[in-house]
Amino acid sequence: MIPHLSERALILAPLGRDADVAAAMLAEARFNTLACRSIEHLVEEMNKGAGFAVIAEEALHTANLAPLAAWISAQPEWSDFPFILLTLRGGGLERNPAARRYLDTLGNVTFLERPFHPTTLLSLARSARRGRQRQYDARARLEELHALAADLEQRVEQRTAERQAALEQLHEAQKLETLGQLTGGVAHDFNNLLTPILGALDLLQRKTEGADSRTGRWIANALQSGERAKTLVQRLLGFARRQELRSGPLDVASLVNGMRDLISSSVGSTIELQLNCSADLPPALADPNQLELAILNLCVNARDAMPDGGLLMIVIEPVQLAPGSEPRLAPGLYVRLSVTDTGTGMDSQTLARAVEPFFSTKEVGRGTGLGLSMVHGLMAQLGGAFLLSSVEGEGTRADLYLHATDALPDVSAACEDDDLLPAQPLTVLVVDDEPLVRRGIGEMLRNLGHNVIEADGGAAALGMVAALPDIDVVVTDYKMPRMDGAEFARRVRETRPGMPILLISGYTGTAGPVQGLPRLNKPFGLAELAGALRRVVEQPDVESPHQPARVAEQPVFDEV
Ligand SMILES: Nc1ncnc2c1ncn2[C@@H]1O[C@H](COP(=O)(O)OP(=O)(O)OP(=O)(O)O)[C@@H](O)[C@H]1O
Ligand SMILES: [Mg+2]
C-alpha cells in the first residue's frame, strides 16, 4: 500500500453526473478523490491504497462483482474497507432486495439514498475515513505485537538452547566426577600395593647383581612392568585429582623451553615444532612436573594424529577472562598454553568422549586412553581449565588455562640436572648488603667460570650498571636496607630494559612490583645457582648480553 494514498476516496459512478457531483463535494471538503471507470479499475486502485469508496448502485447491477468480492474477503485481519453505496430513489434496504445482496458482498457498507444532501455525504465520508484510520492504527499495533512475539520466540529458543547446553555440560562434569571417584579409589589402593612390589624388586635386583643372568632378566622385566604400572596409576590419580601437587608460581615459558629437546625427540623429525611465547607473560600457578607431563601427553597425541608429519605449535600467552566468557572460570588474568596440530582431527563423537578415562581409538596396547584424562584432572585440580577443540581432517587444539599470579617464579626447582659450566663466561654483578653472603655468592660464581663485580647496595649497583656496559646479568638480594631488590630491579630496567636479573631471596611471599622476575630461594647449591643463572640469561623476554635494549613491555611474540 502506498502511504500517501491511504486516505483517498475512490468513486465508482460511471453513468450520469453522480461521480462528478460527489467528487466535487468531496474535493471541496479537501478529500483526495479519484473516479474509477470500472470494478476492475476500482480494485486496482484499492490495492494501491484508499480510505473508502463511494459507489453508485447502478454501477454494480450488470457488472461482474467477483474481483471486488475476492479483494474484500482477502483483506488482512486488521482491514474492513468502508463503502458508501449511493442507492436509487426509493431504493432503501427494506424495499430493495439487490441492496441487501450488496450488503452481503461489500460488508462494511453505508447506504445513502439519492438525492442526498451534501452534508450527509460529507459526514458519511468523514466517518468512513475515521473508521479506516482506526484500522490503520490497529494494523500498527498488530505489527508491533508480531515483532514482539517473534523476538520472544527467538529469546525462548536461545534460552532453551543455553539451558540444554548447560545441562549437557553438567551431565558431562558429573559423569567425569563419578568416574574420577571410582578410578581414584582403585588407583590409590593400587599405588599403595605397587610401592612394596617395586621396592622388593629393586632390592632383589641389587642383591642378585652378577648372579644368574636369567633371574636378572626376569627381575628386570618385572621391574619394567612395575614401572609402567606406576605410570598408569599416576595418570589415573591425575584424572581423579588425587595427585599430590606441588604448585607454585611458575615461569611456563622457561618450562616449555626446557622441554624443547624432549618434545622434538618424542614427536620425531617429520613434525615441525614451533614455540611462541608472549613477551609479557606473568608467572602461572602450576606444578612443574605435572604440567610437563600434561604437555608431553598433548604433544604425543598430536604426533599420533600426524603420522605423515605436520606442524605442532605451542603458544603461551596471557589472556584476560571476562565474566561469562569461555571457559567458565572466575574473571581475571590467566596464562593460556595451547597445543595445536595439523593432524587428522576428531569427529564430534570422538571429541565428546576423548577426555573419558580409558577412551582410546588407538590399537590395543598402544593407547591407555588416560592421557587426556590426566590433563583434564590436573587442570581441574589446579583450578584452571582444559578446552579441546577439533575439526576432522584439519587438526586439533588443546588449551590449558592456568591462573596467573603476582608471586615470583622459583627457578631453583628445576635446575638439578643442569650442567655446571656455562656456555660462555658472563660478567655478573652481585648485589648484597651482607658481605659474607655477597662474597659467598661471588665465590660460587667465580667457581662456575664467571667474572664477578660486587656491590653492597642498590645505589652503588645502579652506578655500576650505568658505568659498565659489559655487565651481562645482575644477581641481587631481595631484602636490603634503603632500596630492596624489587625497587633496584625496576630502576635497572629503566636504563637497561633487557637486563637479566636474578633475585636471591629467603622471602617466599609475593612481590608485586617485580612481577615475573625469576627468584632463587636460599639456600641453594652450585648446580641450582648455575641452572638459575642460565635460565635467567636465556629467558625469552630478556635481551641477550651486549645487544641494544628494547622496551620490555612491548607485546611481541618471540620464539621461546
Ligand atoms: N591431537 C589429537 N588429534 C586427534 N585425535 C586425538 C588427539 N588427541 C586425542 N585424540 C583422540 O582422543 C583419544 C584419547 O586420547 P588420550 O590421550 O586420552 O588417550 P590415547 O592417546 O588414546 O592413549 P595414551 O595417551 O595412553 O597414548 C585418542 O585415542 C584419540 O582418538
Ligand atoms: Mg594420549
Image (cartoon, helix red, strand yellow):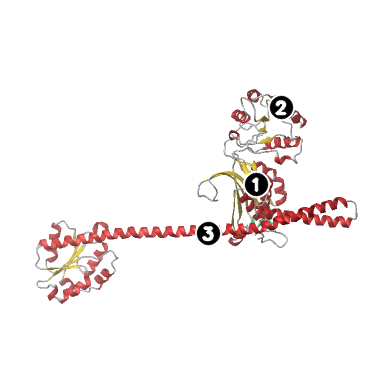
Q: Where residue 270 appears, x then y in whole percent?
A: 70, 52
Q: Pick whichever, 6 or 279, lies toward us.
A: 279
Does mark 2's beta carbon lie closer than 8 Å to ligand 2?
no
Q: Where residue 323 appears, x then y in whole percent?
A: 50, 47
Mark toward the start of the polypeptide (3 vs 1): 3
Q: Which residue is mark 1?
A: 274
Give the class, few, some or many, for how many residues have Cα within 10 Å of label 2's Cα (few <14, many ≥20): some
Foreground: disc 3 or disc 1: 3
Q: Which residue is mark 3?
A: 167
Does mark 3's beta carbon lie closer than 8 Å to ligand 1?
no
Q: Quadrant of ligand 1?
A: bottom right
Side of 267 relative to 55 (left or right): right
* Dot 2 amino acid type: Arg
Q: CA distance from mark 3 to mark 2?
A: 61 Å
* Dot 3 amino acid type: Leu
Side of 135 relative to 153 (left or right): left
Mark toward the start of the polypeptide (3 vs 2): 3
Give the class, few, some or many, for how many residues have Cα within 10 Å of label 1's Cα (few <14, many ≥20): some
